[in-house]
Image: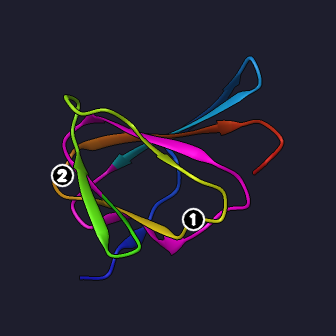
Amino acid sequence: MTVVNLEPKYHFIWDKVVFMVYHANKGEGHKKHHHPYAHGIDCFAGRIKVTKDNLSVELTSDTEAVRLAEDEWHEIEALEDNTIFVNVFTDGKY
């Protein structure tokens, strides 16, 4: 299944930290990509799969956030409808 790229529902900056909040349905998220900066991914509702290299981890509201290193290839996919996840990174690096 190909991931359908998704734009953030909300985007705000607080104390030099960028929060990009996504409301996703199954199959939506971000196709394989990378950034020149580190960032965190957390899931607030539903389930997402974060894949990097050949390793995948499933996140829910009960799991710990994932930190991705600079230039680390990754993909984010919602595994069910009504999923909410967030990407967090330092302002000025996006």
Mark 2 sits on what residue?
81
Q: Is the image coloured rainbow, by chain, by secondary structure, or in one colour? A: rainbow
Determine the residue positioned at 33% across, 76% down. Answer: 54
Determine the residue positioned at 46% across, 61% down. Answer: 6
Mark 1 sits on what residue?
72
Label 2 neighbour load within 10 Å: few <14, some 14-19, many 20+: some
**Residue closest to the eye, 29 or 34:** 34
**Image coords of residue 1 (percent x, y):** 23, 82
Q: Position of 70 compared to 83: left or right?
A: right
Image mark for residue 35: none
Q: Position of 82 compared to 14: left or right?
A: left
Query: Would you say the magenta stretch is mainly helix, strand or loop?
Result: strand
**Image coords of residue 86 (percent x, y):** 45, 39
Q: In the orientation shown, which residue stands out farthest toward the top?
A: 15
Q: Position of 90 compared to 25: left or right?
A: right
Q: Amino acid at mark 2?
A: Asp
Question: Which comes before the other along the chain, label 1 or label 2?
Answer: 1
| Mark closer to the observer (1, 2) | 1
Callout 1: helix, strand or loop? loop
- Is residue 58 located in the magenta-colored stretch of the structure? no
**Image coords of residue 93 (percent x, y):** 79, 47
Residue interval drawn in magenta = 24-49
Would you identify the image quadrant in which residue 60 lies? top left
Label 1 neighbour load within 10 Å: few <14, some 14-19, many 20+: some
- Is residue 37 located in the magenta-colored stretch of the structure? yes
Q: Amino acid at mark 1?
A: Glu
Callout 2: helix, strand or loop? loop
Determine the residue positioned at 32% across, 40% down. Answer: 84
Q: Is residue 4 above or below residue 46?
A: below
Q: Is residue 67 above or below residue 45?
A: below
Q: How many marks?
A: 2
